[in-house]
Image (tube, rainbow, N blue to C red):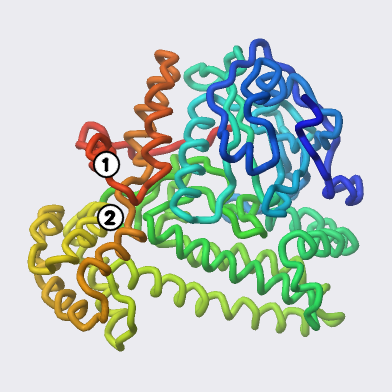
Amino acid sequence: MTAHFPFDNSYVALPPNFFARVAPTPVAAPRLIKLNRPLAVQLGLDPDLLETPEGAEILSGNQMPETAASIAMAYAGHQFGNFVPQLGDGRAILLGEVVDRNGVRRDIQLKGAGRTPFSRMGDGRAALGPVLREYIVSEAMAALGIPTTRSLAAVLTGETVLRDPIQPGAVLTRVASSHIRVGTFQYFAARGDLASVRALADHAIARHYPEAAQAPSPYLALLEGVIGRQAELVASWMMVGFIHGVMNTDNCSVAGETIDYGPCAFMDTFDPKTVYSSIDQFGRYAYGNQPPIALWNLTRLAECLVRLLADDDDKGIEIAQTALGGFAEQFNAAYLAKLAAKLGLFTSQPDDQQLSQEFLTALAKGEADFTLAFRRLSDAAVDPSDLGEVRALFADPAAFDEWAPRWRARIATEPQDATTRQAAMRRVNPAYIPRNHRIEAVIRAAVDRDDFAPFEEILTVLANPFEEKAEFARYAEPPQPHEQVLETFCGT
C-alpha cells in the first residue's frame, strides 16, 4: 500500500524550526465515509486500494506510508486582529507531498489526526460535523472554479470527541497546493529570524511563483504575486456570496487558495453586513469587509518581507507600500469584470459599474436571495421583458423595478444573440450552492442517524453547480424561516 503514495517531500528539507516531526494518534475503529476517487486518480493514487480497510487505516493516521513526512507545521497569526506568536498545526499532520498528473506539487494532510506540539491544550481531534462541512464546501468551491484546498477523504474514527454536545470523531484528508500561510512568515519575522524568512520566501517562490526567481527583485515579485492571487480569490468569493468567516492571517494561503473552512457560509438573502461566524461579534469578517481584510492580511505579509525588499527599512517599506497600493486596482478590475459577466454584460460602457452596483443595492433593499436572483436573471436573458420570476424574489421590488428597464436597455446593446447571452450567464451564475440549511440537514443525518445518503446526494448536486436538474430543484431553494442557519462554528 505504501508504494501507492509517491511522496516527494520538499518542506522537510527546510530547517527543523519550520515544523515538528510527529505521528498521528491512532484511532479505535476507522471507517471510510467517502473517498474522492477522481482526485485520488489526479494525485497518482490508487482509489481501489484506498477504499480497502487498509486504506482507511492510512487515511485515519493509524498506518503511515514509509515515505511520509509526518510533520506539524509552525506558524503564527493575527486572530481577529490580535497577534498570536505561535499557533501551528494543532490538529493537522502533513503526510507529505506528491506531484500530480499535471505536474503540480500538492500537500496531503490529515486534519483531526491528534495532538501535536502546537495543540495548545486541545485534543487535536475533529468532529464529524465540521469534517463533512469542509468536505462539502471545499468540493463545491472547486466545482465553482474558485481556487481552494480539496478534500480527498473523510473517515470516522470510531471514537467520540469532547464537544458540546459530544460528537463522533472524524479525520479529513485535505489536499492543498501548499499549507504556507501569511502566518508562516509571521512566525519567523516575529522572532527576528530573517534567515528563516528568506528560506521560506525562497521555498514559496520555487513552489508557487517560479517566474519571480527571474525578476529583478524576486521577493517583490513574490509579494506582488500573492497580492494578485488574493485579489482574484476574494473577488471570486464575492461573486458567489461566500463568507470565509475567519480571515485570520493564519488562514490566508500564499498560494492563493481558499483554506480552512471553519465558520464559513454562502449568503442566502443579500446583505453586505452578513456574518455567520459565531465568534465574529463585531463583524470584522462580514461579507462586505472581505476585500479590506484581504489587504490588511497582505500588509502583514509585506511587513515580514521588508528586510528582503531593501537593505534600508525605509526603502523596503516604500517598496512594500507601492506593491500593496496595487491591490485595490486588481481587486476592483476582477470584481467588476466578474459582476458584469453575471449581469450579461460582455462589452464595456461607462455606466456599467453604476448599473452593477445598483442591482446589488436593489437586492439588499428588497431582501432578495443572492444566488437565485442572478440565476433567474440569466433565465430572463432570452426574453428580458419577462422578469417576473426575478421580481418575485424581492420583498420590496421598488428598487428592482427602477433598475430593470435600464438593464434591458443595456443588454440590448450587447452583440450576442439572446440564447448565447443566456448560456454565458448560466456559466457564471450557479443554480446550486452549498446552502447552510442543506449542510445542516446532511450533518444531522450523519451525526444523529449514521445516514450518509444525504451527504452523497449533496456532493452529486454540487459537483455540477451550473447544470439544473429537475430532481434537484429543492437544492436551489432558499431556506424557509424555520430552516435558517444563522451561525456556523469553528471545528476545533
Using the image, determine if residue 162 lies above or below residue 221. Answer: above
Kind of residue at disc 1: Lys
Depth order, front residue of 490/339: 339
Quick check: 345 left or right of 406?
Answer: right
Earlier residue among tags 2 and 1? 2
Kind of residue at disc 2: Phe
Using the image, determine if residue 48 lies above or below residue 273. Answer: above
Q: Where residue 276 appears, x then y in whole percent?
A: 40, 44
**For the point 15% across and 73% down, which residue is it?**
403
Depth order, front residue of 364/69: 69
The residue labelled by disc 2 is 370
Residue count near mark 2 (Cα–Cα under 10 Å), binned few <14, some 14–19, many ≥20:
many
Instruction: Tell me how many marks there are.
Output: 2
**For the point 68% across and 24% down, which residue is it?**
49
Visible residue check, residue 446 = yes
The residue labelled by disc 1 is 469
**For the point 26% across and 76% down, which residue is it?**
416
Question: Where's the C terminus, which quadrant?
Answer: top right
Quick check: 61 left or right of 40?
Answer: right
